[in-house]
Amino acid sequence: MSKAETGPTSPAPAHRLIVDIDALAGNWRALDGMSAAAATGAAVKADCYGLGVDKCVPVLRDAGADTFFVAHWSEVTALLDHVDPGQIAVLHGPMNSQDVEFALSTGVRPVINSLEQARRWSEHRGGACHLMVDTGINRLGVSASDFSETVLQSLEIDCMMSHLACADENNPMNDRQLSAFREAATKIGYRRLSLSNSAGIALGGDYAFDVTRPGLALYGGVPRAEFSGTIRQVAHIEAAIIQVRNLTDGDSVGYNAQFTADRAMRVGTVSLGYADGFLRARGKGFALQHEDRELPVLGKVSMDMIVVDLAGAPDLAEGDWLKVPFYLPDAALQSSVSQYELLTVLGQRLRGR
């Protein structure tokens, strides 16, 4: 037996991520209600956008999601503890024979993105699969001109899908992609159609088809104004003060001395940094909170620490916990970092790993 198996359990870190599972389930139900007659799936790639598969997938499953989308084959195993393999779709498709063999042995559905992937799947006598059609985003997906190929026509397509490039904007490209997708649907057989991501759901029933694929909005992101007041914050971050110190006039804080005190100050060093997903872009002009009091961040964000001004909270001491505001639309505006990135860069330590 290894030392890791017999040794003591590691103490909890001085920071934590709290996932509001009621808000997560409520967000799925809200998006399902906006998805017209379509079934509502869930994009759970990147460890449920940084919030944790083991925490989030059971909640989404129990709320009613029955199709789960990941990007990589390496993400599948964690899901198999919670959902049936036939409910899992791997967006990047089978890149080699090992991917095909894994899909066939588990029952997970690949998303076919190219003629090469279609041939690879067919050569191994793969069964039901999904098909991605490119309608203008020019990332993954077969082209409509490929539909004449026998290898595509012979596929057993469960869900044919495409991906919107500009759904978070009122952009003419949305209508162009919708038209292209409808045209593609006349050229090949399938069981279901799927076009809308989170933002696409807000474009209305014409975009819903049979399955919607929300991601960001499940986890508290607000990609369009139509979701304001409907989508609830899911991720909440707290961090503890690990040291309190007194500065004098002229003392600087952190790397490159970007903050210098112009008076005597009481400051707190907080157990949070960019290794936990609190990026340097969130430092300048940002503040942590204790109850209704704001504690401005001073100087650069370090890998494991930030320093805050305790002038507004003279009673706080080592061991006290602070809230890290994480309402995604506000955090994105403050930092100029997208809501997607703010979520997915959350560090493993913050998630308790």
Image: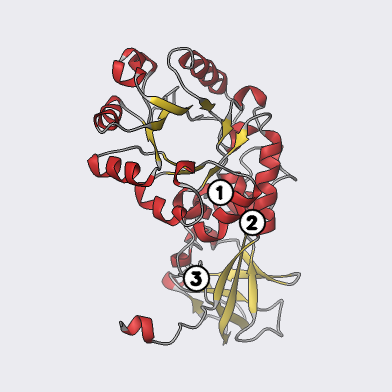
Mark 3–mark 2 distance (CA, rounded to whole Å):
17 Å
Q: Residue at x 52, y 76 (%)?
A: 271
Quadrant where the C terminus lies? bottom left
Residue position marked by numbered label 3 in the rendering:
352
- How crowded pointer 3 is (Cα within 10 Å; few <14, some 14-19, many 20+) is rated as few
- Indicate the position of residue 265 as horizontal and vertical percent values: 62, 82
Instruction: Name the foreground residue: 104 vs 283.
Output: 104
Residue position marked by numbered label 1 in the rendering:
339
Mark 1–mark 3 distance (CA, rounded to whole Å):
22 Å
Quadrant where the N terminus lies? bottom left
Residue type pointed to by label 3: Gly
Q: Which mark is residue 125?
A: none
Report which quarter residue 108 is drawn in.
top left
> Can residue 164 be seen from the camera position used here?
yes
Q: Residue at x 61, y 47 (%)?
A: 218
- How crowded pointer 1 is (Cα within 10 Å; few <14, some 14-19, many 20+) is rated as many
